[in-house]
Image (cartoon, helix red, strand yellow):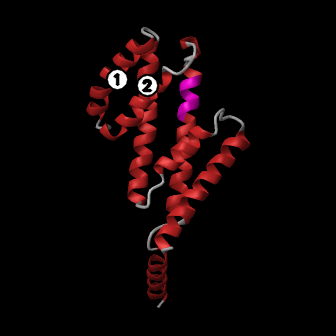
């Protein structure tokens, strides 16, 4: 097994473990798999891609939840999803958040899975956004703090600069 594969496997395992621990410990998150799924999707072997994926996932979840909630106060069922998707595309393009379209559209379709559209309220939108934010923040923290790329080389460079500064 290569060092990169081991690094990426450990990074994903730690991110999922910490995310699940936070979700269970806080008892605020109703379904543990929402934040765990966010962490799995966001963790990437390239740290720059991790940041991009986390921002797209968070922005998509928030934008999709808000647009769908507003549309579903007027329309319901598949018609509400269709109108949500038709409105979502130009709004996300106007904001420059095209990378968030996949998550936003999935959020709109998932709202259709709610048994009663009466259950679709601000509390539900907030909780699903919170789930995603927890998973994404843990994934970012694990990726950037615990296993930064070239950490040994950066540490040597920092030590060298500190030694030069002392002399």
In this view of the protein, which residue sits in the foreground, 31 or 99?
A: 31
The reply to whether discs 1 and 2 touch (Cβ–Cβ < 8 Å) is yes
Q: Which residues are magenta?
A: 124-129
Q: State the image coordinates of residue 118 (x, y, percent, origin top left).
A: 57, 11
Q: Secondary structure at mark 2?
A: helix
Which residue has dot 1 on it?
Answer: 85
Q: Using a 10 Å C-alpha cutoff, classify the residue at mark 1 as few (fewer than 14 neighbours), some (14 to 19) or many (20 or more).
A: many
Residue 67 % position (x, y): 41, 22
Q: Position of residue 111 (x, y in %)?
A: 49, 22
Image quadrant of residue 107? top left
The alpha-carbon separation of the residues under discs 1 and 2 comes to 7 Å
- Image coordinates of residue 100 in percent, x first then y, are 37, 38
Q: Considering depth in this image, is 156 or 5 the residue closer to the camera?
A: 5
Report the residue at 32% width, 37% height from top.
97
Q: Residue at label 2?
A: 108
Q: Is 125 part of what is drawn in magenta?
A: yes
Q: Is residue 83 above or below residue 7?
A: above
Relative to residue 31, is residue 121 drawn left or right?
left
- Kindly identify which numbered label has been placed on residue 162: none
Query: Where is 44 relative to 126, above or below?
Result: below
Q: Residue at x 42, y 60 (%)?
A: 47
- The single residue placed furthest to the front in the displayed view is 1
Label 1 element class: helix
Q: Is residue 77 left or right of residue 32?
A: left
């Amino acid at each position: 097994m290569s060092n990169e594969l081991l690094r990426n496997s450990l990074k994903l395992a730690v991110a999922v473990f910490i995310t699940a621990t936070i979700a269970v410990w806080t008892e605020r998150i109703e379904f543990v798999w929402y934040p765990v799924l966010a962490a799995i999707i966001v963790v990437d072997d390239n740290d720059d891609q991790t940041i991009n994926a986390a921002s797209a996932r968070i922005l998509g979840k928030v934008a999709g939840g808000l647009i769908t909630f507003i549309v579903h106060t007027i329309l319901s069922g598949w018609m509400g999803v269709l109108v949500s998707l038709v409105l979502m595309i130009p709004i996300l393009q106007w904001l420059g958040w095209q990378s968030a379209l996949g998550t936003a559209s999935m959020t709109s379709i998932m709202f259709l899975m709610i048994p009663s559209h009466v259950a679709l309220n601000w509390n539900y939108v907030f909780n699903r956004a919170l789930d995603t934010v927890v998973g994404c923040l843990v994934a970012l923290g694990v990726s950037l703090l615990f296993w930064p790329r070239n950490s040994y080389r950066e540490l040597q460079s920092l030590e060298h600069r500190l030694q030069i500064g002392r002399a």
